[in-house]
Image (cartoon, helix red, strand yellow):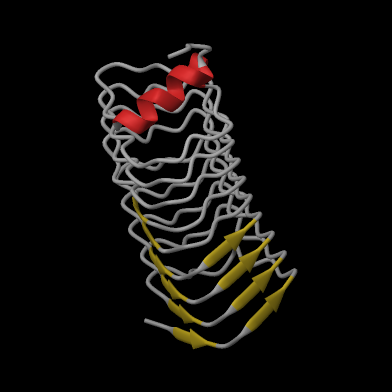
Amino acid sequence: MQQIEGRVYTKETLREEDWSDGAFFNCRFEGCFFRGANLSGIYTKSCRFIGCDFSFAYLNESVHEYTAFENCDFSAASLFGAQLRQCKCVGSVFTGANITGLVLQGGNYSYAVLADCDLRKMDLHNACFAHANMQNCNLQKANLQECDLSHALLQGADLSKADLRGARLEGVDVARLKFNQTKIELEQAATIAEMLGCVF
């Protein structure tokens, strides 16, 4: 297993290299091209990827801790069984990605594009999805406790049997959500009722 620490990569094409099972610590990648690359099993900690292209890349079973993926493109990438622990994915795109078995532990996904993603039964508690595009997401039975969903685009999202207790919903168009046995707190119920034009 190769271990790399503190290196800086700028606008490099890295898709031809086999990065599988490598470990990266405190590295910085800016504008790098990983399209279709094999990154399965890699481990990153406190790294920073800025504007990198991971489309069609394989990140199966990879583990990332306190790593930032800012404005990165994961379109059609495979994140099967990957783990994102307290990562920052602000503005990143996950459209069409395979996220089966993906583990998200907290972190910041503000302004990320997760539209049409299958997030059912995922434990997403304490994560920030402020201003994220989560339209038509399958969030059935998802744990969204204490999540920041403020101003997120959730039109068409299925929240059946999801747990929304303690989640922030300011600026969310609740009229276009699919609720069915969704868990909420009394205070949230009052807020949602007000958003729908109800008067107490």
User: x%, y% of residue 8?
Assistant: 66, 82
What is the total number of numbered labels drawn onto the structure image? 0
Quadrant in the picture for residue 82: bottom left
- Tell me residue 194's x, y (percent): 49, 19
Which residue is situated farthest in the right direction here?
11
Q: For the point 33% across and 35% down, which residue is it?
A: 164
Looking at the picture, tell me which residue is in the foreground, 145 or 91: 145
> Residue at the top extreme?
198
Which percent across, then down, holds residue 171?
A: 59, 31
In the rendered image, the quadrant that contains the C terminus is top left
- Image side of residue 99 versus residue 67, left or right: left
Q: Is residue 46 above or below residue 141?
A: below
- Residue most extreme to the front: 200
Nearer to us in this view, 171 or 111 = 171
- Relative height, residue 91 to residue 76 (above, below): below
- Residue found at x 36% / y 24%: 189
> Residue 149's x, y, as percent?
49, 40
Quarter location, residue 1 = bottom left
Residue situated in front as seen by the camera: 20 or 69 = 69
The residue nearer to you, when weighing 159 against 75, is 159
Q: Quadrant of the rendered structure where residue 187 is?
A: top left
Q: Residue at x 48, y 50 (%)?
A: 128
Taking the spot 52% from the left edge, 37% from the top edge, the residue there is: 114
